[in-house]
């Protein structure tokens, strides 16, 4: 089992534990090239009660989904600054926490402590008192929510990933300094790579015979495919054995990267921001 080596941790916990290949297959399905699915993304199971007194609070909690890549969070406020940088603050709940539509507002979801076999690290994009507005891994794209800053682990990541769809290039930055830049393959005309601010959600391993032994799912989804190859249409960064695709718009929405880029990206801490520009 491999893990990321997280820099500048206030808690030594921003690791991307690699999970079995079957997890990548179930999540991403045919990300590398099989036929897209057509069924709607599932809403997910009931959440455990984390706020609200008595039976009423439990009933309300049971009606909201967990905020994962498999779910849709209705009523989630849209990211108002899709191009905005942050100070690198990322958080991981020690246990499942309520997600609200505003500080002290209405509960819309539950953010689990773990998902996809690893910790749920999400970036903080706004702070109001003890409340933290975070990017969510769920649909719709650019979904955000507010969680309490109490009982969460914090860390800071100096890394940022930028994908320029017009130039078809990916740039990796550390403390705003470029450490790598590569030509990549992006989504085709009918299945474009979605734009906006998202984050590195997980690091998954796949079978050695797969097109990419490591897959890096992001907190965003295809805007044209509800599912893909049995998975929820999650967009990911991953490798590809045929270098001729780099610089072309040929994927179903994922970003295919060369081997050198994949090795560098696999060391980036979870929760690090990813900007996808049109």
Image (cartoon, rainbow, N blue to C red):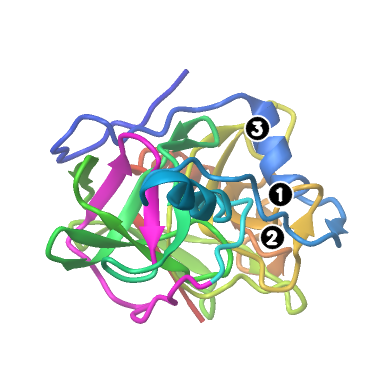
Q: Badge 2, how many Cα within 10 Å: few under 14, some, many 20+?
A: some
Q: Which of marks 2 and 3 is in front?
A: 3
Q: Residue furthest top?
A: 1
| CA–CA distance in space, label 2 to label 3 | 26 Å
Q: Give the range drawn in magenta.
A: 75-100
Q: Is residue 26 left or right of residue 13?
A: right
Residue under the point 27% across and 47% down: 91
Disc 2 + disc 1, Cβ < 8 Å: yes
Q: Is residue 78 magenta?
A: yes
Q: Name the residue under label 1.
A: 242
Residue under the point 80% across and 47% down: 230
Q: In this view, does 207 lie to the left or right of 128?
A: right
Q: Name the residue under label 3.
A: 23
Q: In which quarter of the image is residue 45?
A: top right
Could you say whether the residue bearing mark 1 is in a helix, strand or loop? loop
Disc 1 + disc 3, Cβ < 8 Å: no
Q: Badge 1, how many Cα within 10 Å: few under 14, some, many 20+?
A: few
- Residue 99 placement (x, y as % from top left): 39, 57
Residue under the point 49% across and 67% down: 169
Q: Quadrant of residue 8?
A: top left
**Label drawn at residue 149:** none
């Amino acid at each position: 089992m491999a893990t990321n080596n997280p820099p500048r941790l206030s808690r030594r916990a921003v690791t991307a534990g690699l999970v079995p290949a079957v997890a990548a297959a179930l999540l991403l399905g045919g990300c590398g090239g099989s036929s897209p699915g057509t069924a709607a993304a599932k809403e997910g199971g009931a959440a455990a009660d984390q706020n609200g007194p008595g039976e009423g609070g439990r009933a309300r909690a049971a009606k909201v989904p967990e905020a994962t890549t498999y779910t849709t969070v209705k009523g989630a406020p849209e990211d108002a600054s899709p191009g905005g940088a942050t100070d690198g603050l990322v958080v991981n709940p020690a246990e499942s926490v309520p997600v609200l539509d505003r500080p002290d507002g209405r509960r819309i979801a539950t953010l689990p402590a773990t998902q996809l076999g690893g910790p749920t690290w999400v970036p903080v994009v706004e702070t109001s008192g003890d409340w933290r507005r975070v990017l969510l891994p769920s649909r719709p794209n650019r979904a955000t929510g507010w969680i309490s800053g109490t009982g969460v682990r914090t860390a800071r990541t100096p890394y940022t990933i930028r994908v320029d769809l017009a130039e078809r290039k990916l740039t990796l930055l550390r403390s705003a300094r470029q450490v790598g830049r590569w030509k990549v393959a992006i989504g085709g005309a009918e299945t474009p790579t979605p734009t906006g601010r998202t984050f590195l959600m997980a690091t998954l391993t796949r079978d050695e015979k797969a097109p990419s032994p490591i897959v890096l799912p992001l907190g965003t989804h295809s805007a044209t495919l509800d599912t893909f190859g049995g998975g929820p249409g999650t967009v990911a960064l991953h490798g590809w054995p045929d270098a001729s695709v780099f610089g072309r718009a040929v994927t179903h929405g994922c970003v295919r990267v060369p081997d050198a880029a994949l090795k560098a990206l696999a060391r980036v801490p979870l929760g690090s921001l990813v900007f996808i520009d049109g």
